Amino acid sequence: MGDTTVRQVMRRLVPLLGLIYMVAYIDRQNIAYAKLQMVSALGLSEAAYGLGAGLFFLGYFLFEVPSNLLLERVGARAWFARIMASWGVVTVLLAFAHSEGAFYLLRFLLGLCEAGFFPGVLYVLTLWFPQEHRARAVGAFMLSSAVANAVGAAIGGLLLDQNGTLGLAGWQWVFIATGVPAILLAPVTLLLLPKAPEHARWLNEAQKKWLAAALAQSAEGVAHEGSAWRALADRRVLLLCLVYIGYPLAAYGLSYWLPTIVKGFGVSNTANGLLNVIPWTLVAIALWGVPRHAARYADQTWHAVGPALLGSLFLVLSVVVPGAATKFVMLSLAAAAIFAGQPVFWTLPPRFLVGAQAAAGFAAINSVGNLGGLIAQTVVPTIHDRTGSNLAPMLFLAACLAAAGLGVLAIERRMLRR
C-alpha cells in the first residue's frame, strides 16, 4: 500500500510542479542569454547588468516569507496560479525595457512576483510525502531546474539568432518566448493541482488513510505550538539560512556566467546554447541518482556535504587545468555537484518544523539563501574586475560552497541530531 501510494503521488503531483518550476527557472535564467545582446543594446556596463540581474533576488528576499504564509492560508493551487501569471507578464515586459531604470525595476518586480514558489513547493511536498520519501520527491522536483537549464540553453542561442524577426531583437525574443508559457500554465494549475491529499481524486480511500497516518508519524516529536513567525527566530532556522547561502551563490555564480565563459571559447550563439545542455544533463543525472542513493542510509547528511566539497574542488580545477575542453568538463562536473546535495539539505527543516512554521522556515531559509544570487551577480564580477584574474572569482565561489557543506555537517551533528 505504502510504496504504491507514494509512487502514485510522485507520478501525479511532481511532474506538474516540476513543469511549473521548469518554466520559472527558464524565466530566471533567460537573462544570461539575453545579456549577450542586451548589454550593448541598452548601453549597460557589466556592473549595471550584474546589479539588474541581482535585483531579482532583493525582491525575492523581501516577499518570500509573506508569500509562503499567504500560500499556507489560501492554498497552493490558487497561489501558484497567481505567481505564474504575474511572473509571466513581467518577463514579457522585460522584452520592452529600453532603459537601465526600466531594466532594474522589472527585475525587482520579477523577484517579487516569483517569491514563494520554490519554498512553497517544498512545504507542499511535506503535506504529501512522509519523511523517508522527501529527499527523492525534492530531487525529482529539482530535476526540472536541470531540464530548464538544458532547454533554456538550447533555445537561448536559437532565440538570439532570431534577431530582426518581426522587427524585434533576439534578446527581446528570449523574454517573450520564455514569459508566455508561464501565463498559459496558470489556468492549468487551477485545474489540475489538488488542494490537499484528501481532495485527490486519483487516490482511493485506503490510500488517503495510509498517507494521513504516515504523515502523522513523520510529524511525531516535532513541536506544533507557536506562531509561524516564531520559526524565524529559531536558532536552527537562522543557521540553516546562513549555511544555505553558499549553494545558490555557487549555482548562480556558475549558471549566469557559464554562457559568457563558453562564448570565450570562440563558438557561435547556437553552439554556445547547445554546449550548455551538457552540464545541465549531468545535473539532472545527479539530482536523480544522489537522493536515491541517500535513501539507502539512515544518516543521509553526507549526501548533502560530499557534493558541496566536490563542487568546490571542480570550480577551482575549472580555472587551473589547461585547455578549453578540460575546463568545460570541470565546469560541468561542478554544476552537477552544486545541485546534487540540495534535495537532502531540504529534508532538514521538517525534522523540527511542521505546518505554518514549516512554511515560514522554508521561505526564510530560501529567501536568505537566495541572496547568494545577489552576491554572485555583484561580488563575482567585482572580484574579476579588480584582480584581472579568472581564478579569484572561482576561489571565492569554491570557498563559499565548501563552507556551506561543512556548515550543514556541523548543524546536523550538533543541533538536529540531538
Image (spheres, helix red, strand yellow):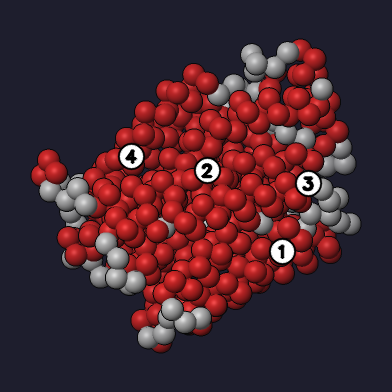
Q: Which percent across, then down, holds residue 201?
A: 64, 13
Which residue does the image show at 34% across and 71% down from the upper left? 265
Dot 1 or dot 4, earlier in sequence: 4
Q: Is residue 333 visible?
A: yes
Q: Nearer the viewer, mark 3 or mark 4?
A: 3
Q: Which percent across, then down, holds residue 337?
A: 61, 62
Left or right side of 166 for 320:
right
Dot 3 or dot 4, earlier in sequence: 4
Q: Nearer the viewer, mark 4 or mark 2?
A: 2
Q: Which percent across, then down, holds residue 175?
A: 29, 46
Q: Gap between marks 3 and 1, in whole Å?
A: 15 Å
Dot 4 or dot 2, earlier in sequence: 2
The answer to the question of whether label 3 and label 1 lie on touching residues, with beta carbons closer than 8 A, is: no
10, 125: nearer the viewer: 10
At mark 1, the secondary structure is: helix
> Which residue bears the numbered disc 1?
305
Q: Gap between marks 2 and 3, in whole Å?
A: 20 Å
Q: Amino acid at mark 4?
A: Gly
The correct choice, above or below, for 274 with respect to 186 in the image is below
The answer to the question of whether label 1 and label 4 lie on touching residues, with beta carbons closer than 8 A, is: no
At mark 4, the secondary structure is: helix
The answer to the question of whether label 3 and label 4 lie on touching residues, with beta carbons closer than 8 A, is: no
Q: Amino acid at mark 2?
A: Ser
> Which residue bears the numbered disc 2?
144
Q: Gap between marks 3 and 4, in whole Å?
A: 36 Å
Q: Amino acid at mark 1?
A: Val
Quadrant where the C terminus sits is bottom right
Dot 3 or dot 1, earlier in sequence: 3
> Which residue bears the numbered disc 3?
295
Left or right side of 31 for 196:
right
The answer to the question of whether label 2 and label 3 lie on touching residues, with beta carbons closer than 8 A, is: no
Corner quadrant of residue 17: top right
